[in-house]
Image: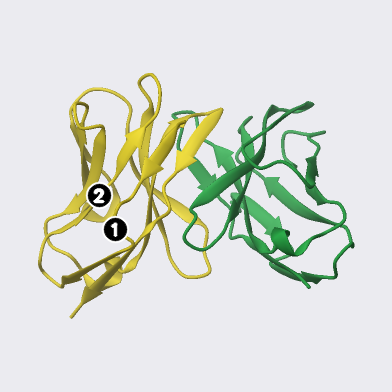
Amino acid sequence: AQSVAQPEDQVNVAEGNPLTVKCTYSVSGNPYLFWYVQYPNRGLQFLLKYITGDNLVKGSYGFEAEFNKSQTSFHLKKPSALVSDSALYFCAAGNNNDMRFGAGTRLTVKP
Amino acid sequence: NAGVTQTPKFRILKIGQSMTLQCAQDMNHNYMYWYRQDPGMGLKLIYYSVGAGITDKGEVPNGYNVSRSTTEDFPLRLELAAPSQTSVYFCAVGGFAGELFFGEGSRLTVL
């Protein structure tokens, strides 16, 4: 079955430290991979995507993600976390007709 | 430019009642989706549409119906509401490169 896993429900980091939010996928073919962010009582907002090409993808707000085909992973990273980065993050994989989302990881950045 | 507009934002239903969640877009995209978001479960696809007059089931279609008579509108109908349909519902529009643009969500409680 096609699925996306985010192994950590919660990630806590101190402001200024690097952050990583993990994602692995089990999707057939060569899926598109995405990261979205959700703030309280809002819809999901697109952060970045991987379709093909360079394994390191840069997105909005200083976020980047590293695609690793052999490990079927697409981890979200940021070199220096901000308190305002605190939110719920979702990884997704698939295509227009079948997009699977992970359960989400709550990132808390403490001052 | 409103993007994706969902109404209502909040609704409380009694078991067995019916209602329609409205979704309208001004982005002129063909692909539209309905997801439900439950705590710790990520997003599950209910129905999607690839264009006016064309709809198809997602992962969790039971208890719901949709129609797509225009490019702009994609209403989701709940017939005979059940407590299991208590959730937050998101409408999304598919971008040309696969990313999704979400509405603000509709929070439904069935008592």
> Looking at the picture, which amino acid does disc 1 mark?
Glu
| Along the viewing direction, whichever of B2 and B89 lies nearer the viewer | B89
Which numbered tag is attached to residue B54?
Answer: none
Q: Residue furthest front?
A: A1
Using the image, name the chain to which the residue with label 2 belongs.
Answer: A
Q: Residue furthest bottom?
A: A111
In the image, what residue occupies the spot 31% across and 69% down?
A86
- As drawn, is B19 to the left or to the right of B11? right
Binning the other alpha carbons within 10 Å of mark 1 as few (below 14), some (14 to 19) or many (20 upward) gives some
Decide: is B14 above or below A29: below
Q: Image quarter for residue A83?
A: bottom left
Pointer 1 and pointer 2: residues touching (CB < 8 Å)?
yes
| Along the viewing direction, whichever of B18 and B71 lies nearer the viewer | B18
Which colouring convention does the figure follow? by chain
Image coordinates for residue B8, horizontal then vertical, percent: 74, 64
| Along the viewing direction, whichever of B57 and B94 lies nearer the viewer | B57
Would residue A11 be visible to someone looking at this image?
Answer: yes
Using the image, name the chain to which the residue with label 1 belongs.
Answer: A
Image coordinates for residue B68, horizontal then vertical, percent: 78, 35
Q: Residue beneath label 2, please?
A: A22
Secondary structure of the residue carrying tag 1 is: loop
Image chain in green: B
Q: Residue beneath label 1, please?
A: A8
> Looking at the picture, which amino acid does disc 2 mark?
Lys
Image coordinates for residue B18, horizontal then vertical, percent: 88, 58
Secondary structure of the residue carrying tag 2 is: loop
Whole-angstrom CA distance, mark 1 to mark 2, is 7 Å
Image quarter of the C terminus of chain A = bottom left
- As drawn, is B98 to the left or to the right of A19? right
